Image: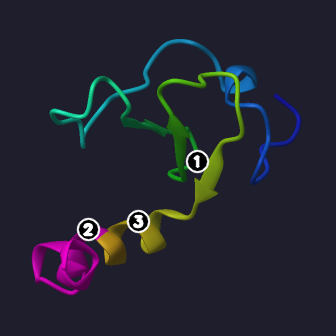
Amino acid sequence: MDRIYNGMPAGQLGREGWRKPWSGGNGGSCVEALRLQDGRVALRQSEDPDGPALIYPHDEIQNFIRGAKAGEADFLLA
């Protein structure tokens, strides 16, 4: 693949390797994640596997996960 960019069709990143780390009892509407070869992470909506992918640098995903574990995203649940 020549260029991986934010908002690209997720299907262009391939069909294999996508995982649902945050699935729950929401009827199958989940966020799926794919770790790219360069360490970045792609996220897509499971109900739209060819829709846009959000591409995040490794350090941003790492900071998000650490912050969520520390309770910094709890305001989203209120």
Q: Is residue 43 above or below residue 18?
A: below
Question: Looking at the image, which residue is at 54% across and 53% down?
Answer: 40
Foreground: disc 2 or disc 1: 2
Residues at badges 3 and 2 in contact (C-beta under 8 Å)? yes
Per the image, the residue denoted by label 1 is 38
Per the image, the residue denoted by label 3 is 61
Task: From the viewer's side, name the closer residue of 72 and 14.
Answer: 72
Image side of residue 16 versus residue 29, left or right: right
Per the image, the residue denoted by label 2 is 65
Q: Is residue 77 above or below residue 19?
A: below
- Dot 2 or dot 1, earlier in sequence: 1
Task: From the viewer's side, name the closer residue of 24 and 40.
Answer: 24
- Identify the secondary structure beneath mark 2: helix
- Dot 1 or dot 3, earlier in sequence: 1
Q: Is residue 16 above or below residue 21?
A: above
Q: Quadrant of the C terminus?
A: bottom left
Residues at badges 2 and 1 in contact (C-beta under 8 Å)? no
Q: Quadrant of the N terminus?
A: top right
Q: Amino acid at mark 2?
A: Ile
Image side of residue 3 versus residue 68, left or right: right
Image side of residue 51 versus residue 34, left or right: right
